[in-house]
Image (cartoon, rainbow, N blue to C red):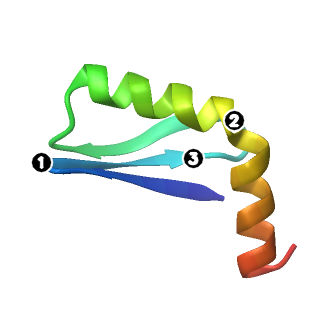
Amino acid sequence: MHVHVYCERGEAKFWIEPTIELAQNSGMTIRQVRLAQALIEEHENEIRSAWQKHFGS
């Protein structure tokens, strides 16, 4: 399970399983990556629920 995060100058991919961690970064600053990860951690349950609803369990 993973999530993509986009900004005006780049994007990043974060693994959600087994733990939240950066998988790939292209053009995002360290600060943007940290902020994105914090938001993913804050909304982890919503992200998991949306993923499962969209792709199935």
Mark 3 vs 1, N-terminal side: 1
In the rendered image, residue 54, in percent from the top left (x then y), is placed at 72, 78
Q: Is residue 31 left or right of residue 15?
A: left
The kind of residue tagged 3 is: Trp
Distance (Cα) linking label 1 and label 2? 26 Å
Choose between 26 and 36: the one closer to the eye: 36
Viewport quadrant of the C terminus:
bottom right
At 35% from the left edge and 46% from the top edge, which residue is drawn? 24
In the rendered image, residue 12, in percent from the top left (x then y), is placed at 34, 47
Q: Which mark is residue 9?
A: 1
Identify the element where label 3 is drawn: strand
Distance (Cα) linking label 2 and label 3? 7 Å
At 35% from the left edge and 30% from the top edge, which residue is drawn? 33
Residue at the spot of label 2: 19
Q: Is residue 20 left or right of residue 22?
A: right
Distance (Cα) linking label 3 and label 1? 21 Å
- 19 relative to 35, above or below: below
Q: Looking at the image, do the residues carrying marks 2 and 3 touch, with CB atoms under 8 Å apart?
A: yes
Identify the element where label 2 is drawn: loop
Q: Is residue 33 left or right of residue 23?
A: left
